[in-house]
Image (spheres, rainbow, N blue to C red):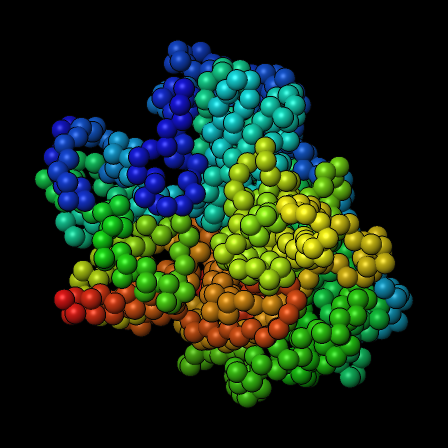
Amino acid sequence: MELNIIEGARVLNSQRFIDEFTSRDMLHLKIVRSDIPRGRVSSIESTNLPEDILIFEANDIEGLNRVAVLEEEMPLLSNGNIAYEGEPILLIAAEDPASLALAERRLKISYETDFSLLAFEPASKNQTVDTVCLSRGNPAKEFEETTQIVEAEYRTTIESHVSRAPSGAYVELKDGRFTVYTATHWPFHVRATIAEVLGVDESKIKVMQTNPSPAYGEKVVFPSILAAMAALVCQNTGKPTRLLLSPKEAEKFTTRKAPVHVKSTSILNEAGRIIAHDTHMRFDVGAYPLFTKELLQRAVITSGSYYQVPNVSITAEAIQTSAPPMNIYRGLGVSQSLFATEVHFSRLAEFSQLNPGDWKKNHTKSKHIITGAHLPNMPLEKLVDTVVEQSDFYRKHSAYEQIRKRRNSVKASRRVLRGIGIATGFTGNGFTDKPGSDKSWGINATLDKKDQLTIECGTMTVPEAIKTIWKRRAGEILGISPDSVEISSGDTDNLPDSGPMMLGMPVTVYTSLVDRCCNYIRKQRFNKPLPIEVRRNILSARRSTWDPSNFTGVPFHSFSWGAVVVEVQLDPLTLVPEVRGVWAAFDCGLVYNTQYAVSIAEGGIYEALAWAMGEQRVNPRYYQDYVIEGQETPNLRLPPVSVVFANRAKGLPGGINEIAESLVPAAFVTALSQATGVYFDRIPLNAETIQSYLEEPS
Amino acid sequence: MKLRFTLNGRTIEAETSTSTRLVDFLRRELGLQSLHPSCYDGQCGNCAILLDGEMVYSCLLPGFAVQGRSITTYEGIIDTLDYNDIISGFHDEQAYPCTYCLPAKIVITQSILESTLDPGQQEVLEAFSGTYCPCTNFHNLARGVIRAGEYRRRRLHER
């Protein structure tokens, strides 16, 4: 049997998408999911099914019925217990896709449903799967001794991603080896998962990456699940098998931004400095948590941020619920945490009677972050200066403040209400620590006799922009032309395991590995005969550099810093918020192509506005609808966005999108609070939610 | 149902069922892989084609809608100088759609430039209001389309 790549795919001149893989005798596969969120399967009635239907259940798995990610795991197929609505129970396969639809309608699954749901609010104590705490000084004592406390709660809701590039897997068996095509950002995890599920050695499996982009994080772990399902059927039937998720399935079950509930309590002194601060974050991680430790650690670090508080306690908790697993969404908890922190601290600035711009600048002076790491090059003061000046923040903030104080109520106002807000902070690039694993993640480089350098990275779909950076850096270090540098394409048979492509790994971590490989080759070049081969792995942080148990030291490979100002106006009749402008300044390390970096940052800002303004992103075009087809139809425009990057002459490049996305919601909500005089404490915010706030007794 | 129509300048005779959507007919039966439907309800815009020169979303039309008509898809544009104009404009203005939505963005741009070589930003944004892919910076995209119009004006004028 031969794999056909449908004629016409070639014209795209790019890596093929998974739905373009097909073959003549291929089996189509469909997941039969649970209809209920919690319970137990009592019976499955499978009479009157089309003759060509094949059914697979957990008992058909020869290996382990699990998908393991570092220290956590979830079942591939339900073993009878249902933990969330949509949990895979059965796989049905047929050559004719029409049979699948018919079979799905005729399959009858009965459940025992006398189980209580695991809710997020309220949640019981035994729903807590993991907790991470950071503590400095003695906040409890300070809270006991003071009478003036600022207390607030913040919430963000689930954000679904919009399914675009298809998710799925195509598996074929040839000469005792499985060849797997899937849209993944972690091909070696796909291989390991299939090996475990099928009970075969990893050497029997070859994984080829298909085009995974664009993606929001759903291509990190989910492809392993889909590929293992397709491989299970392929193992049992010997036939090539393809599983494609429908757009609705991908949106609902692959990955979503975890909702968070944050309680913050603070004490300020007369000078406006924070004396004590307590934050408790609770993340809804769904039925099966993944990457929990990393999520919680990142949330704690970004929540503590750069504010030097002598007595502080930050706790992040992962709550297991009956919602589908949240999986890994871009940013992994950072944007939710930064939202709550920045809105809260802007509120503290207001209580201090200080301009939030000045207040934040005052806190940047120590050049330390919450983990105690001293960062002499911390650029925040300059970034704040830049956005404050560009947006005319001081004048506008004072003017809007005065107007608000003179106004009786929002409803009585006949003019549009305006406000301006600022948010500052950082995001980290790379994992906080090399995740516990018996395998090394790294990259290889080889300089051959023709002075050609070949870089091998196991995450084969690194964006072109990052490949260009590697070529330039390798060229500079070795004194060769960037055109002589090749980034090797291949599969899991001939490339090294480089870990998952997430959390800014390619731009920062892999780039540093390319540097280390090239520096080694440069040193050995005239001592050793060519070719020179080298492998460099991601190292665990030394305890002196980063101690995760005590939260001390430098937690990330590098930092991306940012300051963002958002100005909004609100029509008092329609209560529809409109963004008048966004001013952003970022320091994401070395930027090779400023225009391209600005383009990425602007994209992140628009995404963040969509998150902040959409009640639910049911309609994927929400933000565009609002701007383009909403009230402003006669004046079609996107809100003006100004982005500048600090000009770093050397160092590593850092991630851009995450910092751009993470700061905008807080600045937006703070601006809207100033415009209305109402303390908004959640996103998304739209006319309906604003109305509900205005109706609440003050 | 037997169909006869023009696809990217070539006469095609094919058969399809009345219940098949145009996007599925073009993609599955004729192998046009540039169509990337991800919503099937006209929201993502990734299945845009030109039907008798007018931009339509092929997921919203039945396959038989092409009877006796002329279709242009991304595959019909890429080998033309029109494509060069568009890509050059996009490149100049740092408009980098991902490979998934690029074909639709090219088709929509082509439809804009077939109606005017000097489009305004509003016109461009209106034309793209039925598409969704957050990979795209719409500021840059609008500028890219306007720049593409400049290239095409210059090319046609020089002729």
Q: Between A334 and A374, which is closer to the camera in this rendering?
A: A374
Residue at figure coordinates x 61%, y 49% from the top left: A447
In this view, A184 is above or below B158? above
Residue at 57% in and 52% down: A451
Q: Position of residue A659 (x, y in %)?
A: 59, 63
- Left or right: A153 in relation to A180: right
User: In which quadrant of the rendered view does residue A274 lie?
Assistant: bottom right
Relative depth, front residue between B64 and A456 = A456
Image quadrant in which you'd find residue A18:
top left
- The quarter of the image holding the C terminus of chain A is bottom right
Q: Residue at x 67, y 75 (%)?
A: A379
**Residue at left offset 46%, top offset 15%:** A54
> How many circles with numbers are drawn on the protein?
0
Residue A544 x/y as whole percent: 85, 58
Q: Position of residue A208 (x, y in %)?
A: 52, 35
Q: Is residue A530 left or right of residue A128?
A: left
